[in-house]
Every structure is written in C-alpha cells, then in structure tokens.
Image (cartoon, grey):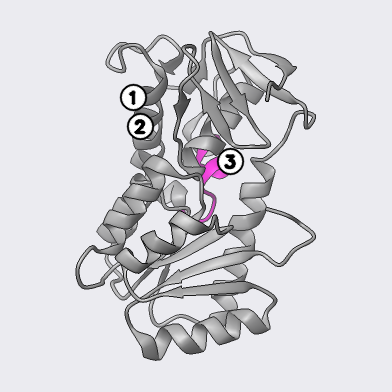
Amino acid sequence: MDETANPSILLVDDEEALRQPLAAYLARQGFGVTEAASAAEARTHLRDANPDIVLLDIMMPGEDGLSLCRHLSESRAIPTILLTARGEAMDRIVGLEIGADDYVVKPFEPRELVARIRSVLRRAAKGGPAAAEDEVFAFEGWMLDPLKRRLTAPDGALVPISSVEFRLLMAFVEHPRQVLDRDRLLDMVQGREAHLFDRAVDNQVSRLRRKIEVDSRNPTLIQTVWGGGYMLAADVRRTAAVG
C-alpha cells in the first residue's frame, strides 16, 4: 500500500441499499472505494486493479463470499474482511480458516468497520518490508520478497500466497529456529478474537506447508513442536533482491 495515497477498498455486496451508503461513508473517511454487486463483478475489477483491502459479503447469489475469499486466499495477498448477516461461530471459523483477516456481523456500526479496516491495514503493513527494500529472505532455496509480497520456489516459480499466509511466513522467517506458540502466531497473523479459534492457526500452517514442503504430511521446514507451537527449521539469510 502506498502510504501517501488513500487506501483503496473493493466493496463486494449484492445489497444495493447497504452497499451504496456504505461506499459513500467510506469515501468520506478518506478511502478510495470501488463497488461490486457480485463475486463475478469483483473478479472483473480484480483483473484490472489490486485494492489494498476487500470487504466481502458472505451471502450473495451465484458465487458466495466464502468461495471468492478462498480464491483470494489462494491467489492474491490482499487483506479481506468478511461481512456477514449470520452470527454463528462456524461462519467466523470457516472465514478465518480459509484466509480472511477479520469479520464483521451485520448490522454493524460503520465507525467500527472503519476501525477494523484500519487495524487490518496496520497489521498488513507490519507484515510488510522488515528487510531493506532491496533485500529478500532466503531459506532452503525459497525466496520471500517482503516489499513485493512475492514467494519464489527453489525452481524459480512464483507461488501465490494469501495475506494471512504471507504474514505467517514473515513471522517464521523473522524468527527462524524459534518456537512460536499459537497465541503469538495468532496475534501476529490475525489479531482480534482469533485466539478463540485455536484451529485457525493450525489450518493456516497446513495451507502454508502444502505450498512450501516437499511432503506436507511429513514437514521438514515448518515443524510442529508438541506442546509448544511451530518452528521454522531452517537458516534464514537476507540477500539482495533480483529483478
């Protein structure tokens, strides 16, 4: 995110009576807002732009918000807040597990939503460049570029990671060979109320393992420390970025 520019939001909600007033309110708070009435329309916008954050309604006709959230988690490092009319814990758990950064239950106070947006953007920024702008983290042939939020495999292929997976991997590369317990990881990666769902971090670790381990069922990079948490079992060095 360019800190000199207004943060850009993609607001995805099929309910026009909520979407348009909310977009106007967010614009008055200094955000640049693009509206989408469906997941299909959101995908069109995402082909042409890279918003700083996505506000995504869960219940929509056609492709629902959870499906689009899963797509974003698997392909783009864009922070996502889910908007849901449901209050059940299961919706929140599923959303967190597939990569959402936060959730807000309708009806919500717009000022609270703005506070959540700014909190998620701050967490995303903290997961940004910890190294110098021309440095990347290198471990076991992998390269993580904190500025571009880009993960490169040992064979040179780019591996898409979600914003949550990016922050999780940043936590590991910044603390190599250190045991990080679930509470600490949840605080680093997801923050608010995520500690209520211990499995959320386990699922994110599993997703990350499927992307960077040779055999995710027998991980050698991100190891489980029974009773302690997880550890990146690799030496990490900072090296000059290429390209």
> Which mark, by number, is residue 207?
2
User: Callout 2: 10 Å neighbours few (<14), some, many (20+)?
Assistant: some
205 relative to 178, above or below: below
Residue type marked 2: Arg
User: Disc 1 on helix, strand or loop?
Assistant: helix
Measured Cα–Cα span from mark 3 to mark 2: 17 Å
- Element type at mark 2: helix
Amino acid carrying mark 3 in the image:
Met
Label 3 SS = helix
Is residue 157 visible from the viewing direction of this image?
A: yes
- Left or right, 187 with respect to 205, comes to right
Q: Nearer the viewer, mark 1 or mark 3?
A: 1
Residue 73: give x, y in percent of width and height: 40, 45
Observer-nearest residue: 92 or 48? 48
Q: Residues within 10 Å of mark 1 (few under 14, many from 20)?
A: some
> Few, some or many C-alpha atoms within 10 Å of disc 3 (few <14, some 14-19, many ≥20)?
some
The percent coordinates of residue 141 (x first, y second) are 54, 9
* CA distance for labels 1 and 3: 21 Å
In this picture, which residue range is highlighted in magenta? 184-193
**What is the chief secondary structure element of the magenta stretch?**
helix
Instruction: Tell me the residue that label 3 is attached to.
Output: 188
**Are circles 2 and 1 on residues that touch, CB within 8 Å?**
yes
Q: Earlier in the sequence, mark 3 or mark 2?
A: 3
Residue farthest toward the left in the current orientation of the protein: 62
Residue 34 on the magenta span: no
> From mark 2 to mark 1, how far is it between C-alphas?
5 Å
- Of the numbered discs in the image, which one, if any, rests on residue 210? 1
Estimate the x, y position of residue 31 in percent, counting from the top left: 65, 73
Please state which amino acid type lies under the numbered disc 1: Arg
